[in-house]
Amino acid sequence: MAAHPFLVSSCLAGIPCRYDGNARPDAEIIAAVENGHAVPACAEQLGGLPTPRPAAEIRGGDGSDVLRGTAAVITDQGEDVTAEFIAGAEKVTELALAHGITEAVLQARSPSCGCGVVYDGSHSGELTRGDGVLAAMLTQRGITVRAVRGNRDTSTADENAGSPA
């Protein structure tokens, strides 16, 4: 393992753990994991949610608001899965700290991993500014996060979310 590995969303590493039972593999992330330079983790699975599972979005804010108790993570079926999202974020954060991780590359737009932009909680495909629950927790602990969607770095592509196109 590298002296300072980085954390990656398991779905980017090719592990089929997304809500829909699929992965969102990224060739660079897969290579980093295979070479021992990255540690994959899925907060939603570690929080006890099954795969596949109903789609979930943050309602009433973003991941920081969820951690403050002023927003919730709700599935498209109306189930509150906030506790599972927080539990998973705590487990992944503990894993990151145990490995001396200072950087994370996470799945864009996810209610766990989204960085800077997440779905708005309406389950309509609309985006809003904010972080997912895991991204917020990692940031609070001093870990730098950035988002990738497939092979595309979205750190600038999603800057206009919530703005008229």
Image (spheres, rainbow, N blue to C red):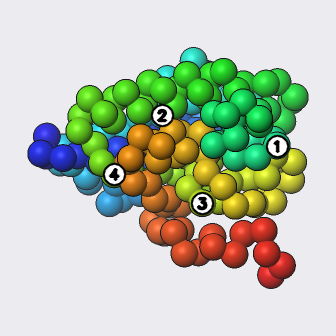
**Dot 2 amino acid type:** Cys
Residue 5, compared with residue 70, is above or below; it is: below
Badge nearest the viewer, 2 or 1 = 1
Question: Are the two marked residues, 1 and 4, in contact with CB atoms closer than 8 angstroms?
Answer: no
In the image shown, does 16 or 96 lie closer to the viewer? 96
| Count of all numbered marks drawn on residues in the image | 4
**Dot 3 amino acid type:** Gly
The residue to which callout 2 is attached is 42
Callout 2: SS = loop
Residue 5 in sight: yes
Q: Give the mark nearest the N terminus, 2 or 4.
A: 2
Q: Give the mark nearest the N terminus, 2 or 1.
A: 2
At 12% across and 45% down in the image, what residue appears? 3
In the image shown, does 96 or 17 lie closer to the viewer? 96
Q: Which mark is residue 116?
A: 3
Task: Find the distance from the CA under tag 2 to the CA under tag 4.
Answer: 16 Å
The residue to which callout 4 is attached is 103
